[in-house]
Image: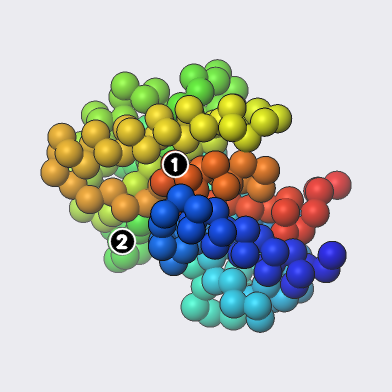
Amino acid sequence: MGLEENYYSVSEGIRKAAEKAGRDPSSVRLLAVSKKQDPEKLRVLWNCGQRVFGENRVQEARTKIPEMPSGGEWHFIGGLQTNKAKEAVEWFDVVESVDRMDLAEELQKRAEIAGKKIRVLLEVNVGGEAAKHGCRPEKAGDLMKRVRALTRLEVQGLMAIPPFREDPENARPFFRKLREIRDHLEQSEGVALPELSMGMSHDHAVAIAEGATLVRIGTALFGPRK
């Protein structure tokens, strides 16, 4: 199938997964993972109605975003080094991968200088994998308290990249864990954390069943990357 057909197929799959879970389909947004994709392809998705895009390299995004129409929403979804915080604040609307205080403080500093606020998600390493970013689940509450004290950052929820499982059902416990952490933080701290960014091309239906509000889809849209 072509890119347009892929987009409509993925969108329909999201709608059906939400309805099956008893959720309003509008409560789940498709985040098109556009890394290594040229702007021409992204404009095809734009013309289909897609407005939310995710990049994991600042260097790539800063050349791509200016070539796109204004009005989109750009999420940084990769591991972010503190020396890239200035550009992340400049180019992105949301940083989904805040997992430590030195990064949060650098984002705060750069947002202060830029005179803007930036929305963030806290990344939680729900699978305890050494090779992945994210704070430990038991540290999420402390991290959230400290990040929420930073006036230029708006904590909107949590993000996770769980361990890959061939059978999507086997990823369910990790998605459930992130939702439970979010629910606990909302209750214990009296804050609203509406966003749960979890689920990718092969397992997003299960993530939606467990409460995902943002699903990060790349392969199902663009095909396998070379």
In this view, 80 is above or below 218: above
Q: What is the x, y in percent for residue 110?
A: 36, 54
Mark number displayed over residue 210: 1
Task: Please tell me which residue is depicted at 72% across the width and 54% down the height of the picture.
Answer: 220
Q: Which-is-in-front pick, marks 2 and 1? A: 1
Name which of mark 2 and mark 1 comes first in the sequence: 2
- Side of 198 relative to 224 (left or right): left
Q: Which residue is more in the foreground, 99 or 52? A: 52
Mark 2–mark 1 distance (CA, rounded to whole Å)? 30 Å
Which amino acid, by three-letter code, is at mark 1? Answer: Glu
> Amino acid under label 2?
Lys
- Give neighbour class at mark 2: few <14, some 14-19, many 20+ (Cα, 10 Å): some
Q: Is 134 above or below relative to 72? A: above
Q: In this view, does 206 lie to the left or right of 149?
A: right
**Residue 159 location (% of width, % of height):** 44, 42
> Disc 2 marks which residue?
117
Q: Where is residue 6 in the image (x, y as percent from the top left)?
A: 74, 64
Instruction: Specify few, some or many for label 1: CA neighbours under 10 Å numbering under 14, 14-19, or 20 or more.
Output: many
Q: Viewer-proximal residue, 161 or 14? A: 14
